[in-house]
Amino acid sequence: MPAAPQPSALPPSNTTPTSSSHETPKPHRKPLLRLELRDLSSSGSRAFLRLLHASTTLEDAVASVLSHLYTGLPVHCIPPTRSITLVLRSMGGVAYTTGLDIDDDHKEIHFSTDYINGVPEHRQKEEMQGVIVHEMVHCWQHNALGSAPGGLIEGIADWVRLKAGFAPPHWKRMTSGEWDAGYEKTGYFLEWLESGHGVDIVRRINEGLRECRYEEGEFWGKCCGKGVEELWEEYQKSLKGQEIEKEETADGVEKVESESGAESSKAQDASPSDPQDLHDSDQSHEDLHTKARRGGNMYIPVRSKPV
Ligand SMILES: [Zn+2]
């Protein structure tokens, strides 16, 4: 006699719930979200208003950042950010985030309307959302009391952007250079860490940057049980054999970037290794650096335009 029908097997129980299965973490107090358009007639402002609903875009970015960085953590782990103002204005570069001089709990995201205008129309909406998510991370992430490497800070920001589904088409995994080169290079490395160290590894990294100063050996030993250089080597090996496009050029040629943080004078004062990093260091760029020294924590990514 055939066996009675049995219910099909349950899915494996070792799948860790993803952030989407949790409620979005709530900060101690809901941040005030504001929008400032310095020139309504600019093409970048018009594209922003045409393609996005500002209130939901900012709210969604906050929710995405909080769920990726703070799901399952107590509310006191979330920074006390009180307000975030998105300022759309004409400037060089792409965007940067700063805290107000008088109170670092009030953040401003400055986003270049010239940059928005230069993005191909079919990419504009996602690119704006991606940049806003990246900058929103800076409004909520920890930085080891200003001592975390700038590349790790930028890598976490691009990791969240990647996880939020806004990785632009020109991003690629790269097998050369240093782990803390920042941006998507570090972001993809962090993504790879999830496979061996748990889907919450970046959450734990960010939490590890909350109260203590950054000491590389100790930090990575605690998070992953080994040094970051060893992890980076493993990551590079894992990429070999896959059809990964090699980085075409040395660091700094493909992408122009700079960063600064008033709380981290080391990172701020580090000179770019390649003089081309500064090839576009016009007046506006200089202004940003001057301002970075005056303002709160500030990150100034300057990317080449997507191809
Ligand atoms: Zn950044």
Image (cartoon, helix red, strand yellow):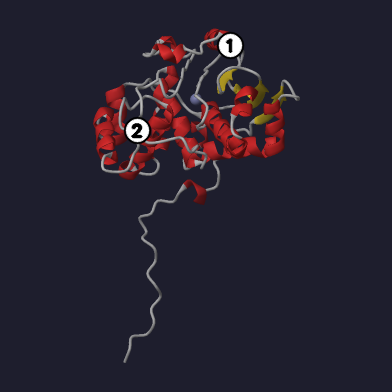
Q: Which residue is mark 2?
A: 174
Helix, strand or loop at label 2? It is loop
Q: Work out whether 215 lies above or below 76.
A: above
Question: Foreground: 115 or 37?
Answer: 115
Helix, strand or loop at label 1? It is helix
Q: Position of residue 306 (x, y in %)?
A: 51, 31
Residue 112 lies in what quarter of the image?
top right
Q: Is residue 213 left or right of residue 131?
A: left
Residue 26 visible in the displayed image: no
Q: Which residue is mark 1?
A: 284
Residue 1 lies in what quarter of the image?
bottom left
Q: Is residue 83 left or right of residue 77?
A: right
**Which numbered disc covers residue 98?**
none
Q: Is residue 55 left or right of residue 295?
A: right
Q: Is residue 96 left or right of residue 191?
A: right
The amino acid beneath tag 1 is: Ser
Question: Which residue: 38% across, 14% down?
Answer: 274
Q: Are marks 2 and 1 in contact (CB under 8 Å)?
A: no
Residue ranking furthest to the bottom: 1
Question: Foreground: 2 or 124?
Answer: 124
- Crowdedness near tag 1: few (<14), some (14–19) or many (≥20) residues, C-alpha within 10 Å: some
